[in-house]
Image: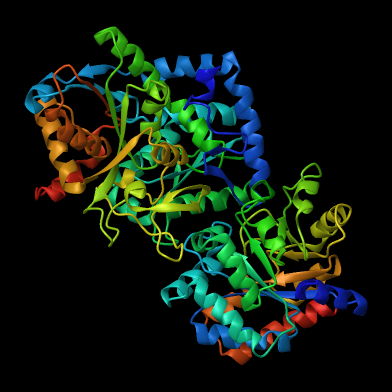
Amino acid sequence: MDDLVNSFMNGPDEKGRFGIFGGRFVSETLMPLILSLEEEYEKAKTDDSFWEEMDWLWKHYVGRPSPLYYAERLTDRLGGAKIYLKRDELNHTGAHKINNVLGQIILARRMGKTRIIAETGAGQHGVATATVCAKFGLKCVVYMGAHDVERQQPNVFRMRLLGAEVIPVTSGRGTLKDAMNDALRDWVTNVRDTFYCIGTVAGPHPYPAMVRDFQSIIGKEAREQMMEQEGRLPDTLVAAIGGGSNAMGLFYPFLDDKGVRIIGVEAGGKGVNDKMEHCASLTGGRPGVLHGNRTYLLQDDDGQILEGFSISAGLDYPGIGPEHAWLHDIGRAEYVAITDKEALEAFQLCCATEGIIPALEPSHALAHVMKIAPDLPEDHLICMNMCGRGDKDIFTVAKHLGFDMG
Amino acid sequence: MTRIESKFAQLRAEGKKAFVSYIMAGDPDIETSLAVMKGLPGAGVDVIELGLPFTDPMADGPTIQLAGQRALEAGMTLQKTLQMVRDFRTGDNETPIVLMGYYNPIYSRGVDTFLAEAKEAGIDGLIIVDLPPEEDEELCLPAQKAGLNFIRLATPTTDDKRLPKVMQNTSGFVYYVSITGITGAAEARAADVAPEVARLKKATDLPIIVGFGVRTPESARDIAAVADGTVVGTAIVARIAEKKPVPEILAFVRSLSDGAHSA
């Protein structure tokens, strides 16, 4: 009983709050929809047949469990803690995003919805959504900032091949937050047949909890695999954070293991400065309300939302999931920022020492591992989430390294 | 009694429908915006809805979004919006003003500070799109306590089961959103709206004002006829975007108010 009261895993409360964060800040048109989603999700959560379907698809369609891989050369190179990589980049579609998409699409099918909408930044969530929609024969519409459409052409083409309609968003400044605005506008317009598949642990309740639950497969597996390989839990978890879904998925099953240090890595862009050339909502933002939840946001003195800046389109969001905001405030997790430059160095090191081309998002996590590992003892176990592969990023990296790809 | 409540009492006594118009504060600049605002009562506007600009207006269509962007680019802020209301009040202490927008600029200012400032500036009510009844303790209850009306949106998705919850802490009037969608999208149809207003009337004694998708004097007349009044926003804001001279904008508003008042 005492443990239950002191648990960090009880959130959110019935109002969708993690402490003061989270909630349901949506227009009245959407309120009945998110209430019905919550009801259906609560039913599915305790329905064995729902999880049996998920497990089957995770195994045979996604390729789970993803390996927990001891990065030996990287460990030797850094000369300190023992580094394990949770290889979610090996999933079908190349990132952790599909873990969550499968859950939401199965739920959408149970609710009789025939049209799926999604927002995407780098395009990974869009590709995952388009993929699962193709598999189930559902109509798929993906909103993507016009600026991101430009810089992520391969993913735009992938989504179109998969049969999705990609709508470039020009409202606002044409980035991920504007894509989310337009997806919400679509949802209020097409309330009857449409399911909004959100890609991260943000948005109105129940999305932050639901997406976390679907992504928690990462942490559950990592926990078992670490026990198998090392006979004990890891000492430190490290994961990159944009909205925070891969991090929440890794962290959640360990929240009550007080001996496990938890570190989230935000995108520091050109550096966390007063010019806001970064996306580090926790490090450089303050609490506010956007996209249905209260959380830390990049905003000006007047409460107007600012655009983030990062080399990684997947981290380029001015907010962060509300559960992270709560974990930050109560001190259960630490949050740090890594610059574009540091992430690029980590990207190259990972390629050269492990033969793994990481996405720019987990390159941020790796850059922080590079900072802390050398000073930790050899028996210190670090588990880092390698949440995506870097194929989509080679053009961006080439540009920054001055390599002409023609 | 707030100015809103007095105005509706007066309209009821006269057997008249209400005409409500929306403009974005500071669009395209404070001077023009204030000039339009000052002319609205003379153009037959019973209640002014003043938009508070926000970077991420999730319930609005492109016309209102762009208006907000223009205002922000011209330097509009919450403080300047309140100052605009004070300037308006020097010449008009009667016309009710409802501030309409999103929660974050208010939350950022601090709810109690904002409410004191808004009341002092001469604002009478608030429509905050992203605060459903589930979040009433955020702003709705403190606002009512501070003497401001909190006007709720009811929508086609608000079913009978939910309706009492939506009406519970609403005051001033009820804003019925005629369509599922964003501002300025599909056209509202009186035949669809009439049964919905009747449904709402069973749950509240407050006036029901219908908006979203009302663009012409004819439409204002038809929609007002089946409700207690109507709101026009996007069609007016579109004329401001076209840089029409203020008298021309006000003449258009007059045609709309004549439409609504003829119902």
Q: Nearer the viewer, residue A123 or A33?
A: A33
Q: Is residue B205 left or right of residue A217?
A: right
Residue A49: which quarter of the image?
Answer: top right
Q: Nearer the viewer, residue A340 or A378?
A: A378
- How many numbered dots are placed on residues in this image? 0
Q: Is residue A159 left or right of residue B147?
A: left
The residue at 13%/40% (across/down) is: A345
Q: Which residue of the protein is positioned furthest toward the front in this rendering?
A: A2
Q: Nearer the viewer, residue B194 or A166?
A: B194
Report x, y in % for residue A139.
Answer: 53, 38
The residue at 54%/26% (across/down) is: A106
Work out whether B152 lies above or below B133: below
Report x, y in % for residue B209.
Answer: 78, 66
**Residue A102 visible in image:** no
Residue B193: which quarter of the image?
Answer: bottom right
Q: Is residue B48 left or right of residue A152?
A: right
Q: Quadrant of the N terminus of chain A?
A: top right
Work out whether A258 lies above or below A336: above
Report x, y in % for residue B9.
Answer: 87, 74
Report x, y in % for residue A72.
Answer: 13, 19
Work out whether A279 lies above or below B77: above
**Residue A146 visible in image:** yes
Residue A229: which quarter of the image?
Answer: top left
Q: Nearer the viewer, residue A172 or A375?
A: A375
